[in-house]
């Protein structure tokens, strides 16, 4: 089954298609939500809400747009809505890097470094870095997802990379 076929089957409420779509998008959805709410439990709840919304709204998906971008936008909106309703300080959980960096060997040092470097960034920078460096989206795609100009996305990414490089030099990592 490919993505186009899975989307069509999901419109007919096919469970296997849902599973395919979930596996195809789950790391991006998790990464975008955890970046905003910074709580594993809340992220899992919002992921469930996201996929419920995907199933309910699948017939309104416009195939002229990238499917994963559409799903991420739903997830991002759910997370932002939650954050606005529950404005309180949320800390980065050191165990989250396993989900944020699935291709990196998950040992304590890598987890500490990943979370440390992400903690140096503000929310906008962190969101761009997650989508670009970890989810392999291009700046143009990120701009559409975040509804910001491409120039702003490029600037945020470069600013974030400079912060991390400068800190790496200071810490001699």
Image (cartoon, rainbow, N blue to C red):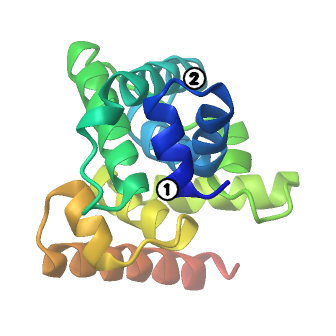
Image quadrant in which you'd find residue 40: top right
Residue, disc 1: 4
Q: Secondary structure at mark 2?
A: helix
Q: Farthest residue toward the left? A: 149
Label 2 to label 1: alpha-carbon separation = 26 Å
Report the quarter where the N terminus lies.
bottom right
Q: Residue 37: x, y in percent?
A: 41, 30
Image quadrant in which you'd find residue 79: top left
Image quadrant in which you'd find residue 132: bottom left
Q: Is residue 165 left or right of residue 151?
A: right
The residue at 22%/14% (across/down) is 85
Name the foreground residue: 48 vs 151. Answer: 48
Q: Residue 168: x, y in percent?
A: 58, 79
Q: Are marks 2 and 1 in contact (CB under 8 Å)?
A: no
Q: Is residue 114 above or below residue 162?
A: above
Residue, disc 2: 44
Q: Is residue 73 left or right of residue 91?
A: left
């Amino acid at each position: 089954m490919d993505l186009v076929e899975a989307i069509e089957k999901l419109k007919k409420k096919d469970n296997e298609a849902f599973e395919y779509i979930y596996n195809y998008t789950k790391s991006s959805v998790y990464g975008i939500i955890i970046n905003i709410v910074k709580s594993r439990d809340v992220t899992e709840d919002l992921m469930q809400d996201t996929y419920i919304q995907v199933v309910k709204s699948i017939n309104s998906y416009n195939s002229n747009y990238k499917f994963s971008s559409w799903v991420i936008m739903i997830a991002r909106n759910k997370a932002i809505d939650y954050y606005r309703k529950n404005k309180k300080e949320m800390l980065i959980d050191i165990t989250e890097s396993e989900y944020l960096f699935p291709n990196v060997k998950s040992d304590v040092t890598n987890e500490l470094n990943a979370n440390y470097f992400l903690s140096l960034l503000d929310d906008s920078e962190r969101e761009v870095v997650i989508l670009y460096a970890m989810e392999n989206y291009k700046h143009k795609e990120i701009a559409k997802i975040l509804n910001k100009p491409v120039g702003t996305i490029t600037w945020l990414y470069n600013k974030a990379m400079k912060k991390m490089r400068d800190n790496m030099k200071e810490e001699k990592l």
